[in-house]
Amino acid sequence: MFLLSTLLFADLNWAEDYDSALSQAQKEHKKVIVMFSISGCHVCKMMRDDVYSDPEVMAYVEKYFVPVELHLDFDDKEGYEVFGTPTFYFLDAYAKQIGDVKIGGSNKMGFMKKLREIQASK
């Protein structure tokens, strides 16, 4: 699983799993992005190829967030409701949800707007 995530997200430092994402966020005083995906999700692929690969998005995520992807094919949902893929939860370092759940993809501008909104919240 980690190898798959590493290959898919070669330019971002994605956490290996949910628990390590929270641990890293606590150590680095960052927030967590949890992305739920599933095999064959075309929107998930678009997010990887077009949004996460953008240098501005990568730099912002690396500075303020610890991202983790949970594959519904083989990962537990960790108690979160998943309404479709991708589904994004934004958490503080202690797993408290910040802002609204984001369902579906978006372009770079839309995703950056959401990230800035989450980062600005306490």
Image (spheres, helix red, strand yellow):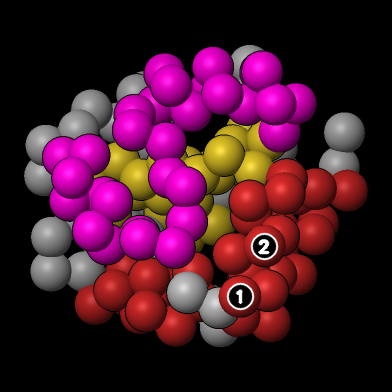
Q: Please tell me the numbered disc located at residue 59.
A: 2
Q: Is residue 24 visible?
A: yes
Q: Please tell me the numbered disc located at residue 55.
A: 1
Mark 1: few, some, or many residues within 10 Å (few <14, many ≥20)? few
Q: Is residue 117 left or right of residue 69?
A: right
Going 71% across and 60% down the picture, which residue do you hit?
A: 60
Magenta part mainly helix, strand or loop? Answer: helix
Kind of residue sitting beneath label 2: Ala
Q: Is residue 95 visible?
A: no
Q: How many marks?
A: 2
| Tag 1 secondary structure | helix
Going 35% across and 60% down the picture, which residue do you hit?
A: 9
10 and 35: which is toward the camera: 10
Determine the image quadrant of residue 70.
Answer: top left
Residue 29 percent across, percent down from the top left: 75, 26
62 and 71: which is toward the camera: 62
Q: Please tell me the numbered disc located at residue 45.
A: none
Disc 2 from disc 1: Cα separation:
6 Å
Kind of residue sitting beneath label 1: Pro
Q: Are marks 2 and 1 in contact (CB under 8 Å)?
A: yes
Relative vertical location of residue 90 with respect to residue 84 in this rendering, above or below? above
Residue 21 lies within the magenta run? yes
Going 63% across and 69% down the picture, which residue do you hit?
A: 57
* Magenta stretch, residue numbers: 1-30
